[in-house]
Image (spheres, coloured by chain):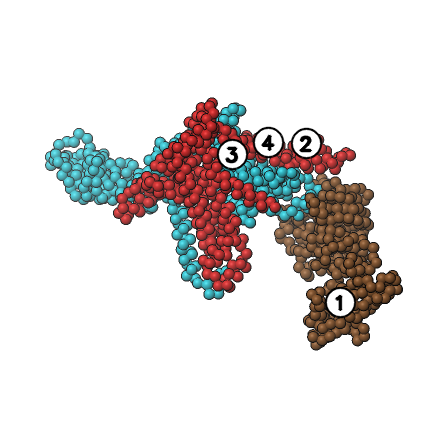
């Protein structure tokens, strides 16, 4: 049971270390460096207060800087070098990428994912949120639909093998085809559409997330606006699309972008379902293929992903700054 | 709004039924996995999990155990197929089995209909009745008792064997512990660090605060993949290498933007008066944080904890990169993805069970904590 | 239990000056009310005294010590917030004990202080409840109790009654007045936009407007001798009527010929040579009397409101000016559409310099730019 003990020790050391850092550094600041006594008491207090935020933020800034900011720069730099990392080749890796057929397929597929998955999840989530809003058992329904959120992508892939398997005695789809006398197919081998079968899995997972957030947003709409619309003679569809949806547009956009970002990180589903075969490769899984084999290409792919996300990132920052004002 | 005059109840029914259909659609895949994990591997391969409660036609093999009787110049074996074999006797119990067809060759186990006497040639005949009784006659003394194949309605069988196999074999127990070892520190440490940072960004005044908040929001969308190669190189360079320490650090850092973002959004929504009141009461920033902010931010802390727990528990990518690939430090997702999906690709019972074992803990966490998830997220995204 | 001196206090956010030239001397045992329209900076001034906002100019002295850079906790003040600011995760007892625990007081001392405050405020039965289990009035009392427990030099109240409903507001107002009476030595500063609260509670009222002090004085001083048009119209409801005119007679009394006809005589003395000066004559609605002789104002009644004890007359607007309002005692029927002549006792007639909107010949305390309401 060595790992358990090791784990426990780490938890204690790690957590204790964090607490200790914050407590002791704070104590040091107040009692030793700028003590709140003596003739400079008020100057010391003000100075301590100026330093304190940085003290509190240091570990977070350090972690963010090392693990996220540095890699963005580091990866870009690495992507300019060849496979072994010893020869500067400029944009050679990118050139190689964009001329490679596999990459083009992955890029195109990824665009499909980025368009379809957030749209479908958000739309389904919104519809379900609205439908369950007034149901007596709405919360149970929502819990059950939300449940896939808790399931790993690997687990989800396994679950969906019981739907997609090409054996009518295992896969549900083929069982249904069999029942109607249609031939057995392997959904993973159907060109082009196999991408969508894979997307269904992620949509299945993410709809619950969209639903929960949007459901809360719907609850936050002032009841009076809906009642006013009823008195104005709007039917339920008009109320939904013309009164409710515009009021929660902000939340819809947040959900949409959150799922978009997630889509660009998920490689597990493709990795476990098809391994990227049969033209189902997407950028993250494509990158994993090159990882450890050719870091130059792998980092170049990562940077392409980064550039695809860039508009979302800028939009997010603009939004956050507007909120601050 | 249920009180509004003149609203139609038919619409209500339509909504109820639609939601029911959606919920069932959503549940089907998981239920399939759950049911399959309790089924016998032979049953899985001949009937879908949706047929699990029904009997299945399975083929079996039995061999006469009794000594032949000589009668009228013939060698005769008689008896009951179900009783000849201990395993069969257990499967079918007391006379519950019903044979539909039989045969004497493994390639055609169901060549003949039960109840009909068949001439097998060479002076041999075989009769198998549906209740399991059989009669085999031969002109010469057989060298060994005949083997009889038959197809019988097998009652549905649910077993915990798969769980036993998964949990004991293949170091799965070790993988489970490894997952816990990765998950718990990787959940607790980032919460602590992020909570302090979020408090600073929400309630302390210092130059550059707006810029830092924007930076955190920007980092929210940096793809993880970008960090993998450089950070692994760094870990190798400073001697951490592929290890638990490395993965803790990685998860801590990768969870940081979301943690700070969620917690700051929540904390900034706490009433200013309460914090000022505490300051007037003489609390230092540290005391305000520990005595006022932390207890009041519990929903957001819980929400992030759930997210981070689910994320680290379910993570495959970071684990594959930052942990060594030997068996001793594999976590469950890696184990399932690499070992079970690969080598045991055909053993559906084991696959289903492994998947269910891996999602059981997150599901429990999820269902017990989900109300905090919603409450904690709301402050962040609903305006 | 302290003297408080504000000298040339200023507050600016960047280049925007929100408060300036604040000079105020608060004596031990006074209950000072800051009153003014929303946005006048009264809460900001209170928060500067509390130390929650930085003072950008001038000095704040408490008991002879300049406290500009002293953090809130060390200033010896206690504050009751508009939203009560109770800590929602602590019981009433813990809420009241929080400051003492932070100050590391002994358990006996804390229990004694909390017990005493709870008795004064009748909170004994609720000590172990969470704030969410209390009614609005009880929460308010806990907030007050929390400040009593600290035994501060100065109590600060930031619109403490504005979240209560009307009936409770009156009851709590009386409780605060009693509390003040029970602690005659305590210094209190109270912010409100409600002039009834200001009039009933204050030892002295500080009227703030346009980023400065419009007038400081006892409630009746402000009512009887407003120093400028702003204070004149801010105190009293309905507001004082201001009618343009021109000085025609000076001396121990001042005679003004009204622009719309009629004549007003005021007990304000005036200097010879001021004849022809443009002024505004101020008369409170309740000071108007129906007259048959020479009126100060004469016009057609547009609307009447009969309240029983009084009848309020709204006159037709002339040239877009605010309608003249008169409050006549008793019930007057059928005045609508009729012409009613109004006069007033010379002691109740105020004369304001028209351009500066200051009381005639009064030394400017502060130039007031803002219009009331």
Give the Cα separation between the discs numbered 2 and 3: 29 Å
Q: Which residue is mark 4?
A: A17
Left or right of C58 on screen, residue B105: left
Gap between marks 3 and 1 measured at Cα? 73 Å
Give the label, 1 or 4, closer to the camera. 1
> Which residue is the extreme one toward the bottom?
C334
Protein chain holding label 4 = A
Mark 2 in CB contact with mark 3 (< 8 angstroms): no
Which residue carries the number 2 mark?
A28
Residue C333 position by quadrant: bottom right
The chain that hosts pointer 1 is C
Residue marked by disc 3: B251
Dot 4 crowding, Cα within 10 Å, few <14, some 14–19, many 20+: some
Q: Same chain for labels 3 and 4? Say yes or no.
A: no
**Callout 4 secondary element:** helix
Report in which chain the residue with disc 2 lies.
A
């Amino acid at each position: 049971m060595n790992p358990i003990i090791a784990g426990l020790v780490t938890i204690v050391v790690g957590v204790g270390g964090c607490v200790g850092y914050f407590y002791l550094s704070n104590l040091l600041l107040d009692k030793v460096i700028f003590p709140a006594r003596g003739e400079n008491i008020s100057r010391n207090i003000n100075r301590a207060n100026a330093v304190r935020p940085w003290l509190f933020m240091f570990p977070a800034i350090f972690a963010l800087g090392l693990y996220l900011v540095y890699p963005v720069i580091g990866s870009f730099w690495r992507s300019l070098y060849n496979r072994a990392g010893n020869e500067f080749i400029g944009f050679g890796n990118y050139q190689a990428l964009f001329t490679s057929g596999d990459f083009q397929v992955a890029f195109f597929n990824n665009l499909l994912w980025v368009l379809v998955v957030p749209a479908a999840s958000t739309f389904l989530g919104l519809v379900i949120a609205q439908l369950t809003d007034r149901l007596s058992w709405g919360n149970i329904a929502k819990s059950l639909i939300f449940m896939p959120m808790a399931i790993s992508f690997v687990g989800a892939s396994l679950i969906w093998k019981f739907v997609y398997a090409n054996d009518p005695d295992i896969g549900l789809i083929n069982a249904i085809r069999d029942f109607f006398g249609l031939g057995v197919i392997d959904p993973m081998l159907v060109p082009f559409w196999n991408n969508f079968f894979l997307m269904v899995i992620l949509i299945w997972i993410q709809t619950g997330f969209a639903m929960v957030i949007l459901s809360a947003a719907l609850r936050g709409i002032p009841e009076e606006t809906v009642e006013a619309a009823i008195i104005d003679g709007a039917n339920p569809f008009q109320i939904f699309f013309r009164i409710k949806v515009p009021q929660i547009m902000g939340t819809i956009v947040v959900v949409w972008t959150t799922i978009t970002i997630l889509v660009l990180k998920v490689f597990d589903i493709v990795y476990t379902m098809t391994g990227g075969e049969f033209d189902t490769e997407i950028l993250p899984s494509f990158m994993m293929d090159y990882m450890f084999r050719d870091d130059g290409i792998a980092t170049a792919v990562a940077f392409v992903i980064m550039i695809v996300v860039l508009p979302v990132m800028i939009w997010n920052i603009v939004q956050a700054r507007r909120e601050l004002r | 709004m249920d009180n509004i005059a003149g609203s139609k109840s038919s619409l209500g029914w339509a909504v109820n039924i639609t939601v029911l259909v959606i919920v069932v659609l959503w549940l089907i895949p998981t239920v399939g996995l759950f049911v399959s994990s309790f089924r016998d591997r032979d049953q899985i391969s001949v009937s879908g999990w949706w047929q699990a409660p029904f009997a299945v036609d399975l083929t079996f093999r039995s061999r006469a155990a009794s000594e032949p009787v000589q009668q009228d110049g013939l060698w005769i074996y008689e008896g009951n197929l179900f009783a000849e074999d201990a395993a069969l006797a257990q499967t079918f119990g007391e006379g519950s089995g019903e044979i539909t067809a039989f045969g004497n060759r493994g390639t055609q186990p169901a060549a003949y209909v039960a109840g009909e006497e068949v001439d097998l040639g060479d002076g041999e005949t075989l009769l198998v009745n549906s209740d399991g009784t059989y009669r085999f006659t031969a002109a010469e003394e057989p060298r060994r008792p005949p083997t009889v194949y038959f197809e019988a309605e097998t009652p549905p069988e649910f077993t915990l064997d798969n769980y036993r196999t998964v949990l004991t074999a293949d170091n799965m127990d070790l993988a489970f512990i490894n997952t816990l070892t990765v998950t718990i520190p990787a959940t607790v440490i980032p919460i602590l660090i992020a909570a302090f940072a979020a408090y600073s960004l929400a309630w302390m005044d210092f130059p550059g605060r707006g810029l830092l908040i924007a930076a955190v929001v920007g980092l929210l969308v940096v793809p993880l993949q970008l960090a993998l190669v450089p950070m692994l190189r760094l870990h190798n360079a400073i001697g951490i290498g592929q290890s638990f320490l490395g993965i803790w650090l990685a998860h801590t850092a990768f969870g940081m933007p979301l943690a700070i973002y969620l917690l700051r959004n929540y904390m900034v929504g706490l009433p200013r008066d309460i914090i000022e009141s505490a300051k007037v009461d003489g609390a230092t920033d540290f005391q305000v944080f520990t005595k006022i902010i932390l207890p009041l931010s519990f929903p957001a802390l819980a929400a992030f904890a759930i997210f981070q727990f689910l994320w680290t528990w379910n993570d495959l990518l970071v684990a594959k990169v930052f942990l060594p690939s030997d068996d001793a430090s594999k976590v469950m997702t890696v184990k399932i993805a690499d070992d079970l999906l690969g080598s045991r690709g055909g053993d559906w019972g084991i696959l289903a069970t492994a998947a269910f074992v891996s999602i059981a803990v997150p599901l429990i966490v999820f269902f017990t904590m989900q109300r905090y998830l919603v409450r904690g997220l709301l402050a962040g995204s609903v305006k | 239990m302290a003297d408080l001196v504000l000298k040339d206090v200023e507050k600016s956010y960047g280049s925007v000056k929100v408060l300036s030239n604040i000079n105020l001397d608060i004596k031990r045992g006074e209950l000072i009310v800051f009153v003014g329209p929303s946005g006048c900076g009264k809460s900001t001034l209170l928060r500067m005294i509390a130390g929650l906002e930085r003072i950008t100019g001038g000095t704040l002295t408490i008991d002879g010590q300049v406290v500009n850079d002293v953090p809130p906790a060390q200033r010896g003040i206690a504050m009751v917030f508009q939203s009560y600011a109770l800590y929602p995760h602590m019981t009433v007892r813990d809420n009241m004990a929080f400051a003492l625990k932070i100050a590391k007081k002994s358990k006996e001392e804390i229990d004694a202080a909390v017990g005493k405050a709870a008795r004064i405020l009748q909170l004994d039965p609720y000590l172990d409840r969470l704030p969410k289990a209390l009614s609005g009035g009880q929460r308010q009392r806990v907030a007050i109790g929390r400040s009593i427990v600290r035994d501060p030099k100065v109590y600060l109240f930031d619109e403490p009654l504005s979240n209560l409903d009307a009936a409770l507001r009156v009851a709590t107002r009386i409780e605060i007045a009693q509390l003040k009476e029970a602690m005659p030595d305590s210094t209190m500063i109270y912010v409100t936009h409600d002039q009834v609260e200001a009039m009933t509670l204050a030892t002295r009222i500080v009227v703030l407007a346009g980023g400065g002090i419009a007038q400081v004085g006892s409630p009746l001083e402000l009512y009887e001798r407003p120093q400028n048009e702003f204070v004149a119209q801010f105190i009293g409801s309905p507001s004082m009527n201001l009618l343009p005119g021109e000085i025609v007679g000076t001396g121990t009394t001042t005679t003004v010929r009204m622009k719309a006809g009629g004549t007003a005589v005021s007990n304000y003395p005036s200097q010879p040579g001021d004849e022809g000066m443009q002024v505004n004559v101020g008369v409170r609605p309740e000071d108007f009397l129906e007259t048959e002789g020479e009126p100060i104002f004469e016009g057609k009644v547009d609307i009447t409101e009969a309240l029983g004890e009084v009848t309020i007359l709204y006159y037709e607007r002339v040239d877009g000016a605010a309608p003249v309002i008169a409050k006549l005692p008793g019930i007057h029927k059928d005045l609508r559409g009729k012409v009613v002549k109004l006069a007033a006792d010379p002691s109740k007639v105020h004369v304001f310099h028209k351009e500066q909107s200051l009381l005639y010949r009064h030394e400017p305390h502060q130039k007031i730019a803002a219009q009331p309401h």
